[in-house]
Image (cartoon, grey):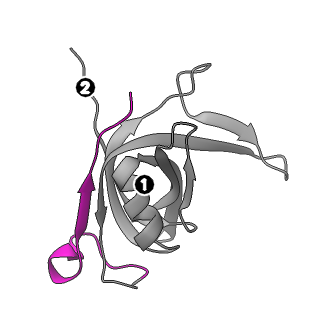
């Protein structure tokens, strides 16, 4: 038996996009950015942003579409969905010719971090602010 669990804490890069499957099942996609900063040996600061495309289903999809907006801090628990052709992230070429990668995640759990209407807040700040947790079934 094998198992994977991915936890992402980041900010929404745009408002959620909700649609319905042919059978009426709601599905919402989120674009979530995570940031990492560090100090280089020469004293300069390094920074890296990684983007994740997150898919939420059913009740989670409806709640996310209703309450989340661009900039909101969220925590997502879920699993990576590798590209079927490569087994890794989906790779494409941007308009400027540089390579881009998309990390696809199916969410099992969504937690809103930061206060209502706040764009951010620090990870772990949920104790002092609104925390809304939604867990739901995955359709497969």
Q: Is residue 67 within the magenta segment?
A: no
Q: Quadrant of the C terminus?
A: top left
70 above or below 6?
Answer: below
**Residue 89 in the image, given as x and y percentages of width and height:** 56, 34
- Circle on res. 61: 1
Disc number for residue 13 = none
Q: In the image, is residue 18 above or below residue 82?
A: below
Quickly name the residue at label 2. 3
Q: Earlier in the sequence, mark 1 or mark 2?
A: 2
Q: What's the distance in space between the residues labelled 1 and 2, CA to CA? A: 24 Å
Q: Are marks 1 and 2 in contact (CB under 8 Å)?
A: no
Instruction: Look at the image and give the residue range highlighted in magenta.
Output: 119-140
**Among all residues in the image, which is located at the extreme front?**
23
Residue at 56% in and 66% down: 13
Say which quarter of the image contains residue 39.
bottom left
Q: Is residue 106 above or below residue 40?
A: above
Q: Is residue 7 visible?
A: no
Which of the two discs, 1 and 2, sits closer to the camera? 1
Task: Tell how many labels.
Answer: 2
Q: Residues within 10 Å of mark 2 (few under 14, many from 20)?
A: few
Tell me if residue 50 can be seen.
yes
- Residue 75 spot, x, y in % from top left: 32, 60
Residue 38 on image: x %, y %: 41, 64
Which residue is nearer to you in this view: 130 or 99? Answer: 130
- 42 on left or right of 115: right
Quarter where residue 139 is shown: top left
Is-magenta flag for residue 127?
yes
Residue extending farthest to the top is 1
């Amino acid at each position: 038996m094998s198992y994977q669990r991915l936890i992402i804490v980041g900010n929404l890069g745009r408002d959620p996009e909700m649609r319905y499957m042919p059978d009426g099942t709601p599905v919402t996609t989120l674009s979530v950015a995570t940031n990492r900063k560090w100090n280089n040996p020469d004293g300069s600061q390094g920074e890296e942003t990684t983007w994740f495309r997150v898919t939420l289903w059913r009740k989670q999809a409806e709640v996310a579409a209703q309450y989340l907006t661009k900039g909101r801090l969220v925590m997502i628990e879920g699993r990576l969905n590798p590209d079927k052709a490569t087994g890794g992230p989906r790779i494409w070429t941007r308009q400027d010719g540089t390579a881009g990668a998309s990390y696809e995640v199916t969410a099992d759990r969504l937690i809103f971090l930061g206060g209502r209407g706040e764009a951010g807040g620090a990870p772990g700040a949920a104790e002092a602010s609104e925390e809304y947790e939604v867990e739901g079934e995955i359709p497969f």
